[in-house]
Image (cartoon, helix red, strand yellow):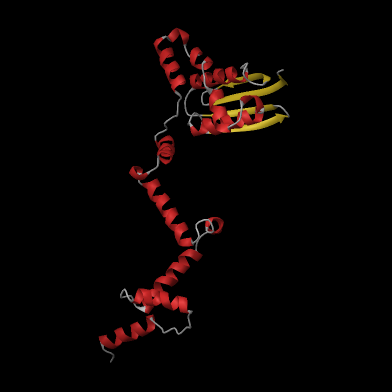
Amino acid sequence: MVSKKGKLEEKNIAETSPIYVKVSNETREIIDKYKDEGKTISYIIGESIELYNNIKSLSPEIVGIIEKYKNKYETETKLFESAIRLLDKRENLERSEDIDLWCRARDELQMMLIGKTTFNQLLSAAESPEESLDKPMKRNIALGVILWVTGKPINVLSLEEIIYAIKKMWIVANYFYFVDIKKLASDEYHVVCKHHENKRYSNYWLGYFKELFLSEELPFKCIVEGQAFDETLSLTIKKLFHKK
């Protein structure tokens, strides 16, 4: 009859098996480093194999990202450290950079980025309902925003560059959550903007963009047609000719 002690010894033998391998001097130095901290060789090997398995289990997409950036960070360790710090900032609001905090506020709190001029005009319209939203539409800063995001003078921008700058910034500002642009002809575009507000909101932006694309400050003459719906704005913008 086998004693409990004998069974335990048999189990330990079954669960562990010796491995004899030759390692490089560099690997030996690493092993010795952690042995000095009181870690056994079997523990070091076990932890290393588990870590190796975790890395090899990463998706091809993540492996591709690691390969893409590892030379920039000199070592994979530095790359992982940087990634973990970024994760910590994302998960911990108090440690977030201003831009990260804004992105989270936009997505989680549905906050909008609004210029001082537009904000003041909206306040003015609220105090004078008879003027409705006409003043905010007409006194908008769209051209300034487009100039800022493109880094180019307005008079050298194409219609396409202006439309894509609007898409980029109006989504960043959380005015729209989706903007689809279709090129109908060489100088004609159909733009669909989606939001979670109402038809009055769509009408405001319809007037806003009509003011923009009919502006005398643009280097070309346009015609603009559009429709406002409850949660969608549809625009067709066509360039007619360059101004002299």
Q: Position of residue 162 (x, y in %)?
A: 61, 28
Viewer-proximal residue, 89 or 73?
73
> Residue 41: percent from the left, percent from the top?
38, 78
Q: Nearer the viewer, residue 129 or 214?
A: 214
Name the foreground residue: 235 vs 171.
Answer: 171
- When the figure is inspected, residue 160 is found, relative to residue 204, above or below; the finding is below
Q: Is residue 228 above or below residue 73?
A: above
Q: Residue at x 48, y 23 (%)?
A: 198
Tell whether 71 sits left or right of 27: right
Image quarter where the N terminus lies is: bottom left
Q: Is residue 155 rendered to the left or right of residue 73?
A: right
Q: Residue at x 53, y 31 (%)?
A: 169
Residue 136 seen anywhere in this rendered image of the structure: yes
Tell whether 160 sits left or right of 87: right
Q: Quadrant of residue 107?
A: top left
Which quarter shows the C terminus? top right
Q: Is residue 45 visible?
A: no
Residue pictured at 50% horizontal, 21% vertical = 199
In the rendered image, the residue lying farthest to the top is: 130
Residue reaching furthest bottom?
A: 1
Q: Residue at x 45, y 7 (%)?
A: 130
Marks counted in the figure total 0
Residue 222 percent location from the top left of the image: 67, 19
Q: What x and y, as percent, mark residue 17? A: 41, 83
Q: Is residue 143 above or below residue 77?
A: above
